[in-house]
Image (cartoon, rainbow, N blue to C red):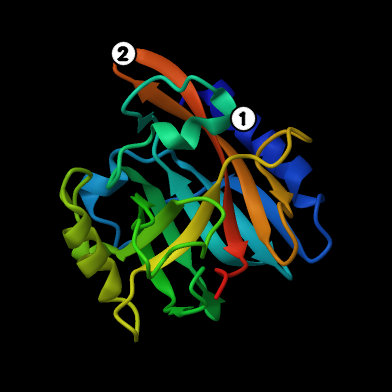
Amino acid sequence: MNKIGIALLLWLGVIASVAGAENALKVTEKEPPKDTPDAIKSVLNPAAVQLLQADKPIYEFWWRRDIPLKEMPADPAKSVAALDEMTLMGLAAVGEGRRDYKDNEIPAGTYTVRFGLQPQDGDHLGTAEFPYFAVLIPVKNDTAPGGIKTYKAMVKASGKATATGHPAVLSLRPPSSAAGEPPNLTSPVPDHKAIRLKLPAQAGDQKTSLTFELVYEGKFKS
């Protein structure tokens, strides 16, 4: 990202940091954690999106500079559907005490973020409004952007981080509103808190953007 783009992100981060009472967002230039594999680090934006609680980061995200899409989205508001499963979206540093969309504990640490789709089977029917998920994989199990090629491998690598063996997942949603300039904090439905993001993306040789909400607090329907 060029200096103008970074400056814009930093400015937006200042605006977003005052948007929430309990939590706040901040965008800052910061190196990814030291345990990040070099091949992963090489594709990341240098700006970290931090979710703060009492001025302490509980999530930090380094998103990919240009997230690859399988096709140009027909509707920019639904661009998350243009992602291919297993696509590397970025990197996350997770703080203590975080829980995923299954209400399982996410151990503190560094994770890659890959795009996953909810299985269309009886075990998952009706548990989420949208089938899109960010799958968190410990960096020791995911060392290259194209290193995970199958759903089974992604689930297995992510499940190594959790006590249950279930992959660690955060819900992704199309944006619930166009209010404000991303990144900003939203509450798309009751008992859900999310970060709305607009990230650079690319479909073939065409530049576009990827807009979605990442639910950091909330859980699936039982």
Residue at point 44%, 36% (across, down) = 81
Q: Are marks 1 and 2 in contact (CB under 8 Å)?
A: no
Residue to which mark 1 is pinned = 7
Looking at the image, residue 88 lies above or below residue 60: above
Residue at point 33%, 75% (across, down) = 166
Q: Quadrant of residue 112?
A: bottom left
Q: Nearer the viewer, residue 62 or 28?
A: 62
Q: Amino acid at mark 1?
A: Ala
Point out the image quarter for the N terminus: top left
**Label 2 packing within 10 angstroms: few (<14), some (14-19), many (20+):** few
Helix, strand or loop at label 2? It is: loop
Residue to which mark 2 is pinned = 205
User: Residue 5 at what x, y percent from top left?
Assistant: 56, 25
User: In this orientation, does residue 33 appear?
Assistant: no
Among the two numbered marks 1 and 2 on one chain, the one whose residue lies closer to the N terminus: 1
Left or right of 147: which side holds 71? right
